[in-house]
Image (tube, rainbow, N blue to C red):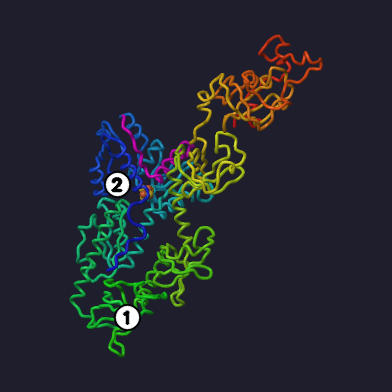
Amino acid sequence: MEVTRAAWAGFCFGVKRAIELALKARAENTGPFFTLGPLIHNPQVVDFLAGKGIQVIEDLAAAKEGTLIIRSHGVEPEVLAAAQELGLRVVDATCPFVRRAQRLAKDLTEEGYTVVVVGDKNHPEVSGIVGWTGGKAQVVENPEEAARLPEHPRLGVIAQTTQPLSNFEAVVKVLKSRDRVVGEVGNGHGAEVKVFETICHAVAERQQAALELARRVEVMVVVGGYESANTQKLTRICLQTGTPTYHIETADQLKPEWFAGVRAAGLTAGASTPDWIIEEVERRMNELGENAQEEMRAAEVKTLRGGEIVKGVVVEINQGEVLVDVGAKSEGVIPLRELSCFEIASPKEVVSVGDEIDVWVVKAEDSEGRIILSKGRADAEKAWGRLQSAYESQAPVEGTVREVVKGGLIVNLGVRAFLPASLVERGYVEDLSKYVGQQVNCKIIEFNRARKKVVLSRKAVLEEEYRQRRKETLASLEEGAVVRGVIRRLTSFGAFVDIGGIDGLLHVSEISWYRVNHPGEVLNVGDEIEVKVIKVDWENERVSLSRKQVIPNPWDSVAEKYPVNSLVEARVIRLVPFGAFVQLEPGVEGLIHISHFADWHVARPEDVLTEGERITVRVLSVDPAGRRMRLSLREAVREGYGPEGETKMAPEPAGGEDEAAQPVAEAAGEAGEPRDEAHTPPEPAFERAGETGGVNE
Ligand code: SF4
């Protein structure tokens, strides 16, 4: 019996995330742990969590201390406030898709809209969303209820995440027919209506996959909690196809008689069913199917007919053929050419002794009385049926890349399928040979059984995964979160960083604490970096990032590193009429005012210093908050440090040698102080320094 698992089954993204968050928090903290209501509708998982010390409570008052885990449905803000008042630590595992709906509900209410939630009034997720509107939202379950809504000048419509799209659209249509729509759906006349489709497609995907599978198999098994609404719905959907369907919670509830004589069985699971239960059920179904077939085989000696497909076991492998026990009076023979639709050198590339395989009966008896079988044709026959339904449902198919041909790759799907080079990746691929031998997931974009033509697109699968990842990333992004990303593109105004399906913008001013003229000075395409999410525009799906906010600000430690009066090394980076800006380290710049250049009057900074030159200076003052530092070259020179070169000596006065030897400071009668500060420009405000590309970015 062949057991097929539905393309989408088991944990959805939000449930998986909630369990992971709960277990991580449990591992990192001590004390009591609670969930308000079961974390998910699956008794086995609830028992498992209880074993880890995570208890279910129905009333917050039952939690005196410890950690409260908010389940994926989310809660009203009042619950969070009450938990805080009780002194509980809160782990918020609200599904990001639900969180988005809550956020929209809150924002719309604050903007003066009356929020309409399309959903089930009694569902905790809907109660939570209504809570974020201060209880002001209206809940409607269907178009009839929407039609009865009182007139509102401004409506904001959102959906419970598990709403069927058709119901949501029907409600929107009713509201559109009487109101002007300005959100995601069109424009009309009348009152103002904004529409946000906040539906999560995880549930719909599981239902569609279950429906398609149920149509193809003889029996369906649905695994999940009896209390789980989405598992019950899956069972109903499968039953509607007429296929016998059994809803179970665990593998030990499977009954052998369900699989007697069954060749193809299907398996699906609700969004709250963990993988370990699904895998156990799948293993047990395979065992039961095997046993049922063993019994059938033992009971009959087959009479074979040409053109039928039967099961057999490989009993012997020779150089040019394989012998197979098909339960007939004698063993059948598969010639080498009938082993595969691809050319092979030895039968061992395809089968091993003991393998159970499907074979096509080519001749029930040839001229020598032998049974001639074909594995290649049986595989192809099965494959065509499978590929046809995959093509119709657009479900992905998996195969192994066999060879590179002109213009693409040949993939083994039981039949030969062509994957054009342009559809192998999302971008261009130079060398196709690296895919040979790899398993690839593709969608069928062209299917013609009569002409034996199957054309694939791996790009379509990758695009879909990318969109899904993008959606999940966007939904789970929080402003202030620190995430890892890969630099995809550099432009003059910043870098685009892929943070999981979304390219966020890292503006050039957010790259570093010091001035960066072009991102390429600091970053390279392909670099993996840590960034902080500083703004998320959920409506336009734009994310702004900052790198400098996750790296230390050098100004935080300047007071310790460069204390007042210390002598430090610096590099002259820019000369301005009133002095020189010098860099002590990347991001830390200070000003030497022209009056602090020398003990004599300096008319122009370039008479003493040159850009790029390294000098020693004394720190006069440090202002980390204002990112300012005042420095003195003159005082360092007095200690014996100074700029090099003859042109930087004190200029000779016109009056002769004696006067020339006299330091300007002495002539002023005020040793150690600048003689002519009254004639030098005053020290500028540092804001001006920033404008000229200096201290403040
Ligand atoms: S919104 Fe979707 S992903 Fe989130 S918990 Fe519900 S079904 Fe799962």
- Label 2–label 1 contact, CB within 8 A: no
State the residue position of label 2. 40
Circle 1: is it few (<14), some (14-19), or many (20+) Cα within 10 Å?
many
Circle 2: is it few (<14), some (14-19), or many (20+) Cα within 10 Å?
many
Residue located 64% across and 20% down the image: 637
* Viewer can see residue 119: no
Foreground: disc 2 or disc 1: 1
Q: Position of residue 594 (x, y in %)?
A: 68, 22
Foreground residue among 304 and 334: 334
Count of marks placed on residues: 2
Q: Which of the two labelled residues, at mark 2 and mark 1, occupies the earlier sequence position?
A: 2
Q: Position of residue 126 (x, y in %)?
A: 36, 44
In the image, residue 97 lies in the stretch drawn in magenta = yes
Residue located 26% across and 81% down the image: 331
State the residue position of label 1. 373
| Extreme residue toward the bottom, this view | 367
Residue located 28% across and 75% down the image: 314
Three-letter code for the amino acid on which mark 2 is drawn: Ile
Q: Which mark is residue 244?
A: none
- Determine if the C-beta at disc 2 is less than 8 A from ligand 1: no
Secondary structure at numbered mark 1: strand
Secondary structure at numbered mark 2: loop
The quarter of the picture where the N terminus appears is bottom left
Which stretch is magenta? 87-114
Q: CA distance from mark 2 to mark 1?
A: 51 Å
Instruction: State the image quarter where residue 662 is shown.
Output: top right
Three-letter code for the amino acid on which mark 1 is drawn: Leu
* Viewer can see residue 476: yes
Q: Position of residue 175 (x, y in %)?
A: 46, 48
Instruction: State the image quarter where residue 655 is shown.
Output: top right
